[in-house]
Image (spheres, rainbow, N blue to C red):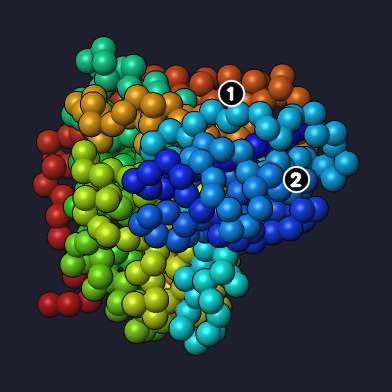
Amino acid sequence: MITRVVVPDLGATGSEVRLVAWLAREGDFVVAGQPLFTLETDKASQDVEAFAGGYLRRVLAPADSAVELGAVVALLADSADEPLDVPGEAPASPVPPSAREIHPRDVRQALAPETGASPREGAAQRVTYDLPLGRLLDMYRRMVLIRRYEDHLYRLFLQGQVPGTLHQCQGQEAVAVGVCFALRTDDVIFSTHRPVGHLLAKGASLPAITAEIWGKATGCAGGKGGQMHLQDLSVGAYPANAVVGANVPIAAGAALGFKLRGVDRVAVSFFGDGAVNTGAVHEGINLAAVKEAPVVFVCENNLYAASTHVSLACKLADLAGRAPAYGIPGQVVDGMDVVAVYGAAVTAVERARGGGGPTLLEYKTYRYPGHSRGDPGNYRQKEEVEAWRRRDPIDRCRQLLVREYGQSETELDRMDRDCRADVEEAVRFALGSPEPSEESGRGPVYAERKGLR
């Protein structure tokens, strides 16, 4: 397969920009997310990453040359000897105006101060396809389960069958699954007001989550929490926190507790781009950094805090660029690629578990629905949503399983049907569960003071 590399629209005022330098040579194998060439606009100079992996078979625009936006500047191929049957002069479809958000600009490591390395030296997020088949299948199934569940809840909500509101995560499944699969059962996560994907990725009970959304006694929080306060301590999923950014210092505290007790466990805090400017986030990350607590901070940058685009709230294009200010590593990763998400999370978790302290991971991702079920998302352009959907994490994982692992479409379809059946059974369980008793509403409110007068 031949992939055209085009000049993206990086916010240039004019249509012509300058290709300053190539960061790879013809014949080199590059991975998705690896910086490929440096582009200079009338606003800034920055590296542009490869949006797909493959061999750099042909460079069509030399270094230090003027190029048009949307022009084809190189051809990538799956193999080193694949015929280049795509003419180099073939016109490329213009990159949508939102391309800067559609793909991470680059996947680069904001290295800890003591390394002395430049960002480019630690640039590429290495995406490997050597995961065991069983592991990748499990990750794929979990993403499918999350998607089918969220989609089913949406349909029921429209029919007036789901009480309260919903904050859904369709499109962000790779972040939840990739991160949680890098953890052990006794490692803990702290989620947000959009917790379904995180809880299911960590292994929480689907029927108990569903019963909680319906406010039933069999719910994972006894019917007291609802959709925004899911929990399952048996798998290390602490109560989700609906206050934006509030779980960051809590996760830091849990991790510090692990360290003080000498317990080999790691905490993970999930939060969105809308949380990064809150005081709790700064204080929590700073405390964890100073104490070298075993915690990983995961920013799911889906570009919108409710309806506010991240560019209106922060001057940084990459939020992980704040990591050096805390004295910790930071990394920007393609959040629509579950393998890349998993690889970055494994490294961060190993660092935390080994006494190296926190890491700030920024996953560039996207939520297909609006902020909540009452939000139609009209502040976003249709083209932007469609462009992100073309990079759907489940579709990409499925293609990988078929192409690289030889899995049959029939088997993956069967897995999808099984997930749908699990979802329907969970809803039946919730609808048939009893309401909480009046007595259960009186407790537990206070912790028991065992051994104290």
**Quadrant position of residue 403:** top right
Residue 93 in sight in this render: yes
Crowding near pointer 2: few (<14 within 10 Å), some, many (20+)? Answer: some
204 to 277, vertically: above or below: above
Using residue 160 as the reference point, say whether residue 269 is left or right of it: right
Residue in the picture at 21% in, 66% down = 280
Q: What is the three-letter code of the residue carrying label 1? A: Asp
Query: Which residue occupies the foreground of this view, 22 or 120?
Result: 22
Residue 10 drawn at (x, y percent): 41, 47
Q: What is the three-letter code of the residue carrying label 2? A: Arg
Residue 156 drawn at (x, y percent): 31, 17
At mark 2, the secondary structure is: strand
92 to 258, vertically: above or below: above
Crowding near pointer 1: few (<14 within 10 Å), some, many (20+)? Answer: some
Q: Which mark is residue 341?
A: none
Using residue 106 as the reference point, say whether residue 309 is left or right of it: left
The residue labelled by disc 2 is: 58
Query: Which residue occupies the foreground of this view, 85 or 115?
Result: 85
Nearer-N-terminus badge (2/1): 2
Give the mark toward the camera: 2 or 1.
Answer: 2
Residue 399 drawn at (x, y percent): 67, 32
